[in-house]
């Protein structure tokens, strides 16, 4: 016998509500997040890294072209220490500015350069029409075990934000860490640092990746309580290579919950299945965050479009032209 239990959830249509009716007196199952009405207020941004070879450039540009019709708010390109990686970032950012309708954001770090050198890079971006910088301290270069400010360089991201604002009225985004930056003395000190970056002129924080939506939501609460009012955008990583992501997560202090290990267990040699699971995990993560009031998402694309495209589709972010 089916008992119809009235549900307060007005967001579900009749057929979905019927599926959620309790049977034989058992309590109703929780609604599937994916069955909620399609979001219509979501904005997205995509992060790429500069390619190292012609083949990698082709992969990147096919991803960029696939994602462009989704009209992201901006697309960002990461920055590494050392001359050639810097040039590759610059070339990728300016090509996006010149050849696409998307607004590029250039990542810029303090590592291994004097203030004058960093300022010159920023000035060349401004002159090329790139007005959005993701301002970062950067990680220690390969071989160095800890970060050392460059003598005569910007020491921390907060100092870089101040310097950039002196050059021009850049839009500036900065990094935030829901699970605390691994070198921070405490979660409070890390939040103070984020506040400093905002007070110095940044207008958006993009987070390190995380998997448990609760982790992000608790961080958001703490940031708001600390007086940080700018948008804090969750960084979402669709995990195609679980082992690599787990290793990277360990280095940057992000927790990989047991349920993630369980989901990807036994799939080391099965990239296709990993991809399907990655899309479903990230889509669920975004839907849960959206149900909690989050409506902007930053995707770590790893220069691949397919998963991000699918997740955006689930989030109601659709191509403005047929593809
Ligand atoms: C969205 C995003 C994008 C990224 N893109 C890149 C990229 O393109 N290239 C790259 O190399 N890396 C990138 N990173 C990684 C980033 O560079 C590292 O996480 C780096 O270790 C910290 O950078 P930050 O800008 O957060 O540093 P900061 O905000 O400067 O903080 C770094 C650490 O120093 C502490 N601190 C800050 N100020 C002081 C002070 N005055 N005295 C003592 N301690 C202080 C902070 O609490 C924190 O622990 C990115 C990270 C994120 C989240």
Image: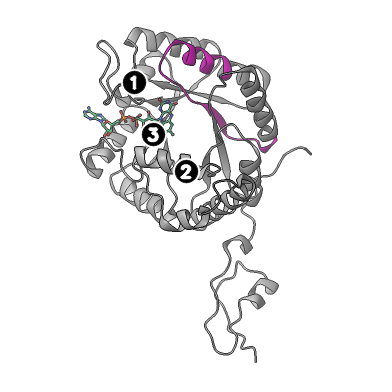
Sequence-first tag of 3 and 1? 1
Q: Which mark is residue 175?
A: 3
In the rendered structure, the answer to whether residue 246 lies left or right of residue 7 reads left
Seen in the picture, residue 139 relative to 70 is either above or below; the reply is above
Please state the quadrant of the image where ligand 1 appears: top left
Is residue 134 visible in the rendered structure shown here?
yes
- Who's the residue at 67% across and 69% down the image? 13
User: Between 155 and 307, which is closer to the camera in this rendering?
Assistant: 307
Please, is residue 251 above or below residue 50 in the view?
A: below
Q: Residue at x 53, y 53 (%)?
A: 266
Task: From the top left corner, tell me how far across and down residue 178 is, in percent.
Answer: 36, 45
Residue under numbered circle 2: 243
Element carrying mark 3: strand
Mark 2 or mark 1: whose residue is earlier in sequence? 1
Please give the range of residues in magenta: 69-92
Q: Which mark is residue 316?
A: none
Which quarter of the rendering shows the C terminus?
A: top right
Q: Is mark 1 within 8 Å of ligand 1?
A: yes
Q: Is residue 90 magenta?
A: yes
Near mark 1 (Cα within 10 A), the count class, few <14, some 14-19 or many ≥20, is many
Q: CA distance from mark 3 to mark 2?
A: 24 Å
Q: How many marks?
A: 3
Q: Residue furthest right?
A: 322
Direction from residue 40 to residue 173 in the image, left or right? left
- Asked where in the image residue 149 lies, by quadrant, the reply is top left
Residue picked out by circle 1: 160
The reply to whether residue 234 is in sight is no
Q: CA distance from mark 2 to mark 1?
A: 33 Å
Residue 268 screen position, x and y as percent? 54, 47
Whether disc 3's CB lies below 8 Å from ligand 1 is answered yes
């Amino acid at each position: 016998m089916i008992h119809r239990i009235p549900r307060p959830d007005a967001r579900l249509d009749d057929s979905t509500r019927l599926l959620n009716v309790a049977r034989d007196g058992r309590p109703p199952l929780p609604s599937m997040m994916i069955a909620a009405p399609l979001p219509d207020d979501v904005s997205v941004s995509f992060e790429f890294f500069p390619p190292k070879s012609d083949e990698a450039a082709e992969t990147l540009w096919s991803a960029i072209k696939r994602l462009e019709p989704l009209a992201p708010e901006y697309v960002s390109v990461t920055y590494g220490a050392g001359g050639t990686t810097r040039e590759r970032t610059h070339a990728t950012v300016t090509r996006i500015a010149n050849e696409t309708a998307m607004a590029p954001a250039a990542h810029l770090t303090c590592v291994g350069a004097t203030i004058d050198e960093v300022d010159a890079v920023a000035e060349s971006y401004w002159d090329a029409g790139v007005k959005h910088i993701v301002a970062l301290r950067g990680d220690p270069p390969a071989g160095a075990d800890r970060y050392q400010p460059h003598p005569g360089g910007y020491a921390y991201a907060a100092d870089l934000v101040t310097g950039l604002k002196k050059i021009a009225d850049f839009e500036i985004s900065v990094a935030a860490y829901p699970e605390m930056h691994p070198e921070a003395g405490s979660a409070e000190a890390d939040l103070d640092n984020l506040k400093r970056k905002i007070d110095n002129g940044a207008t958006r924080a993009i987070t390190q990746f995380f998997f448990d939506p609760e982790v992000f939501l608790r961080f958001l609460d703490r940031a708001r309580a600390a007086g940080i009012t700018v948008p804090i955008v969750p960084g979402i990583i669709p995990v195609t290579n679980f082992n690599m992501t787990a290793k990277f997560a360990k280095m940057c202090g992000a927790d990989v919950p047991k349920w993630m290990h369980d989901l990807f267990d036994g799939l080391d040699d099965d990239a296709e299945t990993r991809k399907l699971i990655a899309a479903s995990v990230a889509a669920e993560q975004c839907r849960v965050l959206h149900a909690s009031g989050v409506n902007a998402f930053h995707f770590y694309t790893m220069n691949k479009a397919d998963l991000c495209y699918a997740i955006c589709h689930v989030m109601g972010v659709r191509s403005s032209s047929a593809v």
